[in-house]
Image: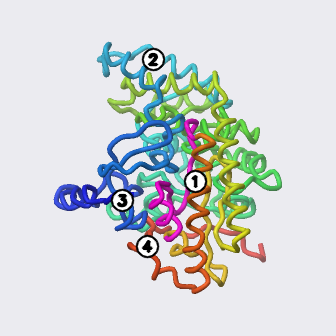
Amino acid sequence: MKSLKNSFDLLEKAKNLIPSLTQTFSRSPYTFVEGTFPIYAKSAKGSHFFDVDDNEYIDYLCGLGPIILGHCYPKVDNSITSQLKNGILFSLPHKLEIDVSEQICDIVPSAEMVKFSKTGSGSATGAVRGARAFTKKDKIAYCGSGGVWHDWYAAIISRNQGVPEFNKDLIYPFDYNDFDGLEYIFEQNKNEIACVFMEPTIFEKPQNNFLEKVKKLTHQNDAVLIYDEIVTGFRFSNGGAQELFGVEPDITVLGKGMANGMPLSAVAGKNEYMKIFDDVFFSTTYAADTLSLAASSATISEFQEKPVVKTIWENGTLLMEGFNKLSSENSLNLSFEGYPVRIKVVGKDNKGNDSILLRSLFIQEMVKKGIFLHPGVEYISFSHTSDDIDSTLQAFADSISVLKKASDENNFESYLEGKPSKPVYSVLKSSIHKPNNS
């Protein structure tokens, strides 16, 4: 890796221009290993990107997940440039709104109607607003990894300034696979829960018919089941996790991979629930920008015509299995867990506790070898190749001696050349569990 001088110079400028240095907290320097990681990107192609100092990296963050086909993917880019010649935004609806809605209804099992927006958070909030209007209730049972940043969720995280206090009393978190916890939430809030808003999977697989039982319980309590498929949609299968696990929600929130990086999200669902949006104010000027819709149409077509998801699963499996084999052979408390299409980095200290220091050292050593990883979650795109996987595993093999020394000495900080990674936020309201005597 060359120097990072240009990145650091730009960072000094940003300190006087941009609050928190970035438009997205998860892209901030402190979320990686500040001082050893690039800060500004310049260009990208396929599964690789270049920083402003012309260092090249294999990209396993994929723009925080949306780059599902690959950077500068020709079919998507050509669709955008073709539409650009005919206009970006109009004073009337555009035919692409119908075309992409039809594609979503064809590919997502529960989708019968579609409403577009620009961000996952915006669509998530729209879905919750729709559920509240439909049920005439206010409270939310929530299970997920965060990522929905409007008031209804932000109330219970550490970055909650500016959010009215009452919002935190309207959200009730529960853990994945903890059906008893959800059941207890309904028992303690009879006839008050508007919706169960959940990711159909995060890193765990559903156990004991969890998703089926959640759906049944939700409907028994006259609530709406909303799946947050912002990450899992178009990644776990063509139709998302609901297709993979065979359990359909009432409403689905889509984002990230649906337009390969262009800003587009959607609320999709059954007619009986979606009709409420005739009267719910969920409306924004830019939801129908035709460049994003053109990108989405081309992206979804690729899923329908090519083995996109199959390839992502296969290459993700090669990466996970190869990584875990090397780690185990060298007795490192470091592993890739979760799903091959949504990988969780797990690092533990000698006492078996989570170690952000080990994970930070790991990604530091990898980035020096041209492998761009996040200390928490990794993604694979359709453009990642077996050569990319081989290069990544070789870089890990070349990093093992440093990781072993730090682990054996139980002194990761002395090997860190920058500041260890920090989380974007912490959750202030714990998941609710059913008491043992209930």
Residue mark closest to the camera, 3 vs 4: 4
Q: Is residue 21 above or below residue 115?
A: below
Report whether residue 308 is seen.
Answer: yes
Q: Is residue 362 above or below residue 436?
A: above
- Pick whichever of labels 3 and 4 is earlier in the sequence: 3
Residue mark closest to the camera, 3 vs 2: 3
| Residue under label 1 | 392
Left or right of residue 162, residue 258 in this image: right
Residue mark closest to the camera, 1 vs 4: 1
CB of mark 4 within 8 Å of CB of mark 2?
A: no
Give the alpha-carbon distance from disc 3 to disc 1, as whole Å: 24 Å
| Residue under label 3 | 28
Residue 420 is tagged as: 4
At mark 2, the secondary structure is: helix
Left or right of residue 155, residue 322 in this image: right
Question: Nearest the camera: 102 or 297?
Answer: 297
